[in-house]
Every structure is written in C-alpha cells, then in structure tokens.
Image: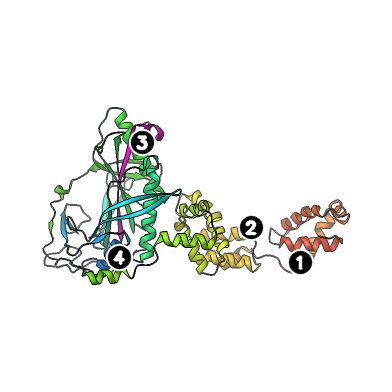
Amino acid sequence: MDLVSYEDALASYDPVMGLEVHVELGTNTKMFCGCATTFGAEPNSQVCPTCLGLPGSLPVVNATAVESAVRIGLALNCEIAEWCRFARKNYFYPDMPKNFQTSQYDEPIAFNGYLDVEVDGETFRVEIERAHMEEDTGKSTHVGGATGRIHGADHSLLDYNRAGIPLIEIVTKPIEGAGERAPEVAKAYVAELRELIRALGVSEARMELGQMRCDANVSLRPIGREKYGTRSETKNVNSLRSVERAVRFEIQRHATVLKEGGTIVQETRHFHEDDGTTTAGRVKEEAEDYRYFPEPDLVPVAPSRDWVEELRGTLPELPRVRRRRVQADWGLSDHEMQSVLNAGAIDLILETIDAGAPADAARKWWMGELSRRANEDGVELSALAITPTEVARVSALVVEGSLNDKLARQVIEGVLGGEGDPDTVVEKRGLRIVSDEGALGTAVDEAIAANPGVADKIRDGKVAAAGALVGAVMKATRGQADAARVKDLILEKLGAQG
C-alpha cells in the first residue's frame, strides 16, 4: 500500500487516540495465588492449581497488588472506589489456562483521573478513564514459522509462569486536539506514565521485558465532524519509539484507506519493529463479547478512606516536580532539559550521579556517546548493556587521569560488547594513559628528532606549532598519553614559553 503523506492525512482528518497501558506489578507473588513471579525461571516451574485453573482451587487477592493499584490511582489524580469487585472476562486462548481472565469490568478500583504531559514546552492533559486490576496471561512461543507468529508455525509452546502475575491496566479517555503532534503526545504520555510507575516503586516498567506494554487505539475524524471514526488497536507495543511510530503509521494508513473509498475495520493489529508498519490481527471484540460477570470466588475490595489517605501520604516526589527541581539544580535550559527527557536519560543520569559521577560528566556520557550508540542500535538508552554504576566508574577513571575521553569511549565500547566491567576492559585492552615521565620523555624526544623543522619553529616562539608534535606523540602512544602533559614537556625541552 502506498500511503498518503502524514501532512496530507492531517489536512483532512483529526486523529483521535485511546491508549491502554498494561503494567506488571513488581510483587513477589501472583495476583491470586502464592506462586513466585521471578523473571526468566524455568518454564512452567512457577505454577499451582490456582493459576492453572484446576478444579477446586480458589483465588485469594494479593494485598500488595491492591495497595499498588491505589497508589497508582492516587498518583494519576483518580478517584478511588469505596467498593469494587472483580469480574470474569471470558474468552478462549491457549495461554489462558482458566479460559477466562480475572479482571475488573464496570467497577474499577480507580477512575476519572488525568496525567499532564509536555511536548516541546506545550502541556497536554490526558484524561484517565480508569485504572483497574487484573492478571496477566501465559506466554506462547510459536516454533517453526518465519515470523514467530502462529501462522506457519510447526507447533507452539506454552509457559504459564506469567499467568496470574498482577497487572494494572490504565485506560485513557479519547485523546483529542493533539493534531499533528498526536504521535508525540502518545509517546510522551507513555514515557511520563513509565516515569510515574518507577517513581512509585511498584514496577520497574521495563518495556523491553514486557513489564509495560501499550495498546494504541487510533481513529480519524473528518475535520469539522464530531463523530469518531472506526478505531484500530495496535497491540503490545513495547518501546516509546515504537508507540510514536505505530500511531503515525496508523494515521497514514487510515487516511489512505478512506481516501481510496475503503472502510476501516475495527480490529487488532500487530506492529513490526523492522519497518514501522502494522498488519491485521483479528476482528476486535466488543465488551459484550466477553460475557463479563462478577467473579463469585472473590470478595469485593473496599479500601477504607483512612487507608487511602495514608497511602496518599506515601507518594514520592512526582516526575514533573522532580524534573523542574533537577533542571534548576543542573542549570539546564528548557531545550537542554527536553533533550534529556526525549532521550529517556533522566533516571540514568541521576543514578550515575548517585554512583559518584559529577553531574556534568554523567550528562555528557549518557547524552553523547551512549545516546549515539542507542540511536545506531535502534534501542532505548536503558536497554544498553551498561549500568549507571559502570558509567560512573568510567567517569572516575577519567577524573583520576587514568583515561582520556578517547580511551574512555573505547572502554564503553568494550563494556557494551560484553568484555567485562570498565576496569576489566582497561586491563584487557591496555588502555590506561601513559603517565610514566620517562616513557613520555622518550616519546617526546623521538617526536622532536623526527620533526626538526617543527621544533625550530617552536624554539623561535611559534608555540602553536607544538600541536603537530603533540599529535605525533599521541600517535606513537596510541592515544594513551596525557596531551596536556605532552605539550608541557615539548615546550620545556625546546625552551619555549606556553
């Protein structure tokens, strides 16, 4: 399909979005049983009769998950229900061992909230319809096909370790008025929500591990009309960059179909990271298709008002407030701070500072070399195989004079390549700066002898010419000399004033 341009799509239509974000809570046990939630465990080793849906088993609500849900609701400016209950969402799928999902339907624990997000200095208020509790499904692995999907696969493997892990699903009201910035608003909302979840300490919200997933609903409305168009839902988008790309593609796809006289099908779609496109999944069900009814095996949840207020008092400094404080502490302009936010670097920089690095050095490495590597690899900064502690160690090696910036970049390359921690890479690659005065003096003597014309210019007072000799020494030492000390030695030996 040849898509209409994004500009042409926006000339005729207003995009309307709805974002549904699932967050895996970081509890020690599952939502309705005592099974562990350890990531990466042996398949089907963290299961029991309850999360497998065996006859006679009964669920019990995880109190920590309820507490986390209330704290999330409060941080999202939601009303907290005085009384709510779980429901059974009925549908057959192989990774649903009970053939229903225990969720919440018309009685969510939190509702009517909002989250303000910023895009290039402009604030957009995203209204929250609801935040409700539910359980995750198992994991299907389709083997033998070319795409990793069920179509064309030889067989499928099912791992129920994830089945029953506590989830909070946060559903927005229709997001209107973003216009051409709709994809950016979607990305900014998910980014802000991720920062909020992490600040609350209820989940690591690592999208690359599936701990936070976004379903992006998009529809187009002809400019000047009030009625929404038919929506499509792109499922399980798992990075901030992909959220933006998926929304942008769907806007163009919808506009193209409508321009050609076609009809938008209400369906789920799959996003493809390689080319930024989506493809059809299945026709999207309506709520009545799930035959919701109250879960008979669970008592209602009724958070007392005193407890809710007690939890309100535990809320940490929220991300927007922290950003303003950090921006002031670091002395950054709005543009500089926005660059840090766009890169998803603020937490990484703060953790690097906490690990001992100066603030300017922490920003330099994450916003420079590491951002470049992340862009080249097409991944989020947080997905790089280097920790804030390791970046702080690289910074410390530079500060103490063991490395210069050029050598430090080689150390970072080694860490990212799996060669070990910074000190191990330095030793393996022999990257430490040459600081022995005797060795440096010999290298300087050799450079002077090999470049007599340059040496004469320096003796005659043309100090700028020393750069050529510094370069020669740096080449001879593979960049492992202290350039400033090398220049001082050159000037001393030639009797020139710096």
Q: Rounded to the nearest whole Å, what is the CA distance between mark 3 and mark 1?
A: 63 Å
Identify which amino acid the numbered label 1 is placed on.
Ala
Q: Are marks 1 and 2 in contact (CB under 8 Å)?
A: no
Q: Is residue 90 visible?
A: yes
Residue 224 horizontal/vertical position (percent): 30, 33
Classify the position of the N terminus by image quarter. Answer: top left
In terms of sequence position, does the residue under pointer 3 or pointer 4 come before the other? 4
Q: Rounded to the nearest whole Å, what is the CA distance between mark 2 and mark 4?
A: 46 Å
In terms of sequence position, does the residue under pointer 2 or pointer 4 come before the other? 4
| Residue hosting label 1 | 439
| Residue hosting label 2 | 406
How many residues crowd mark 4 within 10 Å: few (<14), some (14–19), many (20+)?
A: many
How many residues crowd mark 3 within 10 Å: few (<14), some (14–19), many (20+)?
A: many
Classify the position of the C terminus by image quarter. Answer: bottom right
Identify which amino acid the numbered label 3 is placed on.
Gln
Badge 1 element: helix
Identify which amino acid the numbered label 2 is placed on.
Lys
Direction from residue 266 to residue 186 in the image, left or right:
right
Q: Is residue 417 visible?
A: no
Q: Rounded to the nearest whole Å, what is the CA distance between mark 1 and mark 2?
A: 20 Å
Q: Are marks 1 and 4 in contact (CB under 8 Å)?
A: no
Q: Rounded to the nearest whole Å, what is the CA distance between mark 3 and mark 4?
A: 38 Å
Q: Rounded to the nearest whole Å, what is the CA distance between mark 2 and mark 3?
A: 44 Å
Q: Nearer the viewer, mark 2 or mark 3?
A: 3
How many residues crowd mark 2 within 10 Å: few (<14), some (14–19), many (20+)?
A: few
Q: Nearer the viewer, mark 2 or mark 4?
A: 4
**Magenta stretch, residue numbers:** 1-23
| Residue hosting label 3 | 252
Q: Nearer the viewer, mark 3 or mark 4?
A: 4
Direction from residue 169 to residue 429 in the image, left or right:
right
In terms of sequence position, does the residue under pointer 1 or pointer 2 come before the other? 2
| Residue hosting label 4 | 71
